């Protein structure tokens, strides 16, 4: 996953070349989809550094530049896994839940400083990472009908949230129910998430 310090080294050069940072999008991340006992600690730690530690540190560094100017937007790409943790994603669930909680709490803290925070909760969105994650599970009737979005639509929703100062984006839209009905979401994931292929007897 490389050296996380690279995630911060561009700040000065970028501002010298293009001016102050107006919008920071914390989008970099990886996913591990396999049993917790099949995952080494080193793999999990690398995920936590990239998916959680790096965006938190980058946000802090950028806020030190935004707050004196009293303008700017931070966009945190969390996951529906933050609201409905999925079996087979032990470290990913933890990272995205941590990022989402930090993002939601930061919104009120930064409002007096003129900084807007957008928390994004994507469900399945067609990508190589989504395909690899889906392939790790047994195929069931439920997986065939799982709503899946597209990156283009998600990007437009995020851009709209930035310009209209909306607090959060949930996509595909059906997954918005997870925020309002967390117990039902927990039950559905426990009952309907197919077994991992790696754990098949």
Image (cartoon, helix red, strand yellow):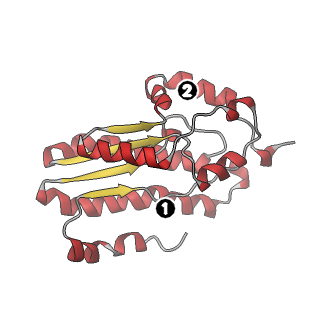
Dot 1 falls on a residue whose secondary structure is helix
Q: Nearer the viewer, mark 2 or mark 1?
A: 2
Residue 193 drawn at (x, y percent) = 68, 34
Q: Which residue is mark 2?
A: 185
How far is disc 2 from disc 1 in space, using C-alphas? Answer: 28 Å
Q: Quadrant of the C terminus?
A: top right
Q: Residue at x 58, y 34 (%)?
A: 147
Q: Quadrant of the N terminus?
A: bottom right
Residue 43 drawn at (x, y percent) = 62, 62
Q: Which residue is mark 1?
A: 49
Q: Residue at x 23, y 46 (%)?
A: 116
Dot 2 falls on a residue whose secondary structure is helix
Vertical relation: 184 (above or below) 125 = above
Residue 4 visible? The answer is yes
Q: Residues within 10 Å of mark 1 (few under 14, many from 20)?
A: some
The answer to whether 131 appears left or right of 106 in the picture is right
* Quarter of image, res 41: bottom right
Residue 193 visible? The answer is no
Which residue is situated farthest in the right direction here?
201
Q: Residues within 10 Å of mark 2 (few under 14, many from 20)?
A: some
Residue 125 drawn at (x, y percent) = 54, 45
Q: Residue at x 60, y 58 (%)?
A: 44
């Amino acid at each position: 996953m490389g050296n996380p310090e690279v995630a911060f080294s561009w700040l000065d050069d970028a501002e010298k070349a293009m001016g102050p940072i107006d919008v920071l999008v914390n989008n970099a991340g990886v996913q591990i989809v396999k049993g917790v006992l099949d995952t080494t600690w080193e793999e999990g730690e690398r995920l936590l550094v990239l998916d959680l530690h790096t965006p938190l540190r980058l946000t802090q560094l950028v806020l030190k530049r935004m707050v004196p100017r009293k303008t700017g937007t931070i966009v945190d790409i969390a996951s529906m896994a933050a609201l409905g943790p999925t079996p087979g994603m032990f470290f990913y669930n933890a990272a995205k839940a941590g990022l989402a909680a930090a993002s939601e709490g930061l919104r009120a803290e930064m409002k007096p400083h003129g900084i807007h925070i957008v928390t994004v909760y994507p469900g399945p969105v067609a990508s190589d990472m989504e395909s690899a994650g889906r392939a790790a599970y047994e195929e069931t009737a439920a997986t065939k009908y799982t709503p899946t979005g597209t990156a283009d639509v998600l990007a437009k929703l995020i851009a709209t949230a930035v310009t209209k100062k909306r607090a959060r984006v949930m996509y595909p839209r059906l997954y918005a129910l997870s925020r309002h009905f967390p117990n039902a979401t927990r039950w559905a994931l426990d009952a309907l998430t197919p077994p991992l292929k790696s754990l098949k007897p």
